[in-house]
Image (cartoon, helix red, strand yellow):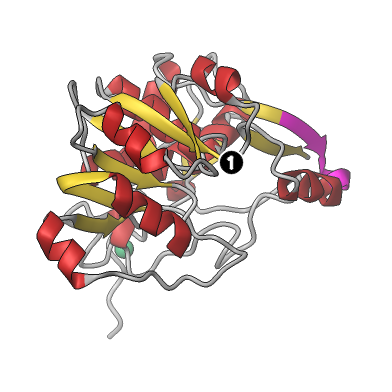
């Protein structure tokens, strides 16, 4: 006889409540979900990846794949927050930084990088952002970066060392990804530091080169982050409701102008998120 599946934990909610979908919806039943490792769920389906995402006025989701939007938070802000902050929250757990620590965040203008910077600042760390844009320093400092260094400047690793008493950064959170930025990350990290690979570039391969001597000699820890736990996703909305994080929305487009929105993203002129409005 086929047994009934275990009951799912219901988040509650009533018709008409405002809700946001989980970007990392766990099955809540598998061997990794049960002990709280929902980001490693073996039976998940990411919106926009394995199931249809948000390019629609209406979507259908299981009741346990949504969370209520806190009062005082509008739909746009909730939408801009969930994808952007949940993985960085998990990252902050994997490579925690605190007062006295310095973290380098690559691709400083991107939505995820800005989220990383805000979370690192919340932890009390000093934040160095890298950018390829020569005219962004002031705007990026206003978003919370303590220092901005330029990717095209060959002295970048030296500048990071000058800002860290000659040691190098305690952590690098690489939001760009790809081998070039991986090598840059290794050149900025201190002995015993941690490099977290977050970015997945689309314009180059995903292979990373690693010199075993550099790895051993530097005792460097290299890690990555897969999605976010259920707690990370709940915490994201709690931090938002408390005003502790501030998602940056660069601009919004109507759904009918999705192609223009993609062109704008590809131009890499944005600072923060670009939203489609159904
Ligand atoms: Zn699961």
Q: Residue at x 56, y 53 (%)?
A: 61
Residue 257, image x and y in percent?
A: 87, 45
Residue 89, image x and y in percent?
A: 33, 38
Residue 248 versus residue 124: which sits nearer the camera? 124
Q: Can residue 64 be seen in this snapshot? A: yes
> For the N terminus, which image quadrant?
bottom left
Q: Can residue 15 be seen in this snapshot? A: no
Crowding at dot 1, Cα within 10 Å, few <14 / some 14-19 / many 20+, comes out as some
Q: Residue at x 24, y 29 (%)?
A: 164
Q: Which residues are magenta?
A: 251-257
Query: From the viewer's perspective, is residue 121 above or below residue 230?
Result: above
Query: From the viewer's perspective, is residue 119 above or below residue 188?
Result: above
Choose top left, top right, bottom left or bottom right for residue 144: top left
Q: Secondary structure at mark 1?
A: loop
Q: Residue at x 47, y 46 (%)?
A: 22
Q: Is residue 256 magenta?
A: yes
Report which residue position mark 1 lands on. Answer: 132
Residue 170 versus residue 42: which sits nearer the camera? 170
Residue 119 vs residue 53: left or right?
left
């Amino acid at each position: 006889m086929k047994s009934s599946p275990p009951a799912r934990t219901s988040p509650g909610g009533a018709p008409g409540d405002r809700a946001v979908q989980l970007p990392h919806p766990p099955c809540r039943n598998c061997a990794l979900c049960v002990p709280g490792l929902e980001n490693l769920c073996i039976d998940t389906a990411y919106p926009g990846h394995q199931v249809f995402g948000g390019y629609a006025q209406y979507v259908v989701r299981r009741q346990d794949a949504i969370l209520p939007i806190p009062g005082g938070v509008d739909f746009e802000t909730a939408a801009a927050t969930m994808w952007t902050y949940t993985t960085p929250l998990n990252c902050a757990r994997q490579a925690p930084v605190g007062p006295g620590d310095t973290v380098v965040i690559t691709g400083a203008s991107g939505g995820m990088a800005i989220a990383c910077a805000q979370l690192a600042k919340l932890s009390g760390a000093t934040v160095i952002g890298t950018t390829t844009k020569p005219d962004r320093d002031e705007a990026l400092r206003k978003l919370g970066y303590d220092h901005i260094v330029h990717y095209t400047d060959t002295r970048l690793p030296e500048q990071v060392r000058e800002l860290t008493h000659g040691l190098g950064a305690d952590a690098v959170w690489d939001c760009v990804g790809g081998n070039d930025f991986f090598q840059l990350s290794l050149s900025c990290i201190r002995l015993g530091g941690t490099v977290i690979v977050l970015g997945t570039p689309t314009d180059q391969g995903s292979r990373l080169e690693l010199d075993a001597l550099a790895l051993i000699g530097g005792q460097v820890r290299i890690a990555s982050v897969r999605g976010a736990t259920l707690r990370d996703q709940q915490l994201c909305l709690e931090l938002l409701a408390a005003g502790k994080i501030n998602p940056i929305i660069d601009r919004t487009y109507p759904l009918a102008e999705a192609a223009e929105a993609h062109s704008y993203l590809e131009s890499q002129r944005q600072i923060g998120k670009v939203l489609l409005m159904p």
